[in-house]
Image (spheres, helix red, strand yellow):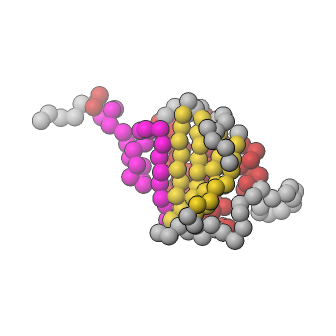
Amino acid sequence: MGAVTSDEKAKTPETDEFGGLIGVGSARTIRAPWHPSSITRIRAAVVADLQARDVEDETLDEVAVVTSELVTNALRHATPLHDNTVRVHWTERNGIVEVEVTDGGGETEPRARPEAVFAVSGRGLRIVRSYAHEWGVSEKKGAVTVWAALGGPSRRRA
């Protein structure tokens, strides 16, 4: 066996801190600990993966904001999944990115609050709505998923 060449190194995908291959395939799922420190770690993993897929910078910026808002809302307003995690799944097809954040559900269904100019919180889903072409909520088997489509319309309907 010989040494690894620079061409072979370039073909070997990197892994992120969650152990996933960056930029490989059209979809990724990670589970992160139910802790505020996961917000920045998740955002970094999603953005790095989508950068490797050559997603446009504007869409990357939107994905970063929306991912942070969805994970923050989950941690603030819901309960963890059975394994004390939050699940984040994303897909990319032809520059359209869908981000899903799944938790164990909360006391109420996630919905955008009415505008309150001087409120110190409660803007998360309004921010998501302003960036997303579409967004929605689904519930099954004790888990709630909030999803958003960025960079173009979703292939599904809420």
Is residue 10 shown in magenta? yes
Point 67% across, 54% down: residue: 137
Point 39% across, 44% down: residue: 21
- The one nearer the camera, 142 or 133, is 142
Extreme residue toward the top, this view:
7
Where is 74 relative to 53, above or below?
below
Where is 21 relative to 40, above or below?
above
Residue 140, horizontal then vertical, whole percent? 58, 60
Extreme residue toward the front, this view:
141
Q: Which quadrant of the rendered structure holds the N terminus?
A: top left
Point 77% across, 52% down: residue: 126
**In the image, 128: left or right of 32?**
right
One can see residue 59 in this view: no
Residue 73, horizontal then vertical, whole percent? 66, 61
Bounds of the magenta span?
Answer: 9-35
Point 61% across, 38% down: residue: 155
Where is 149 relative to 119, above or below?
above
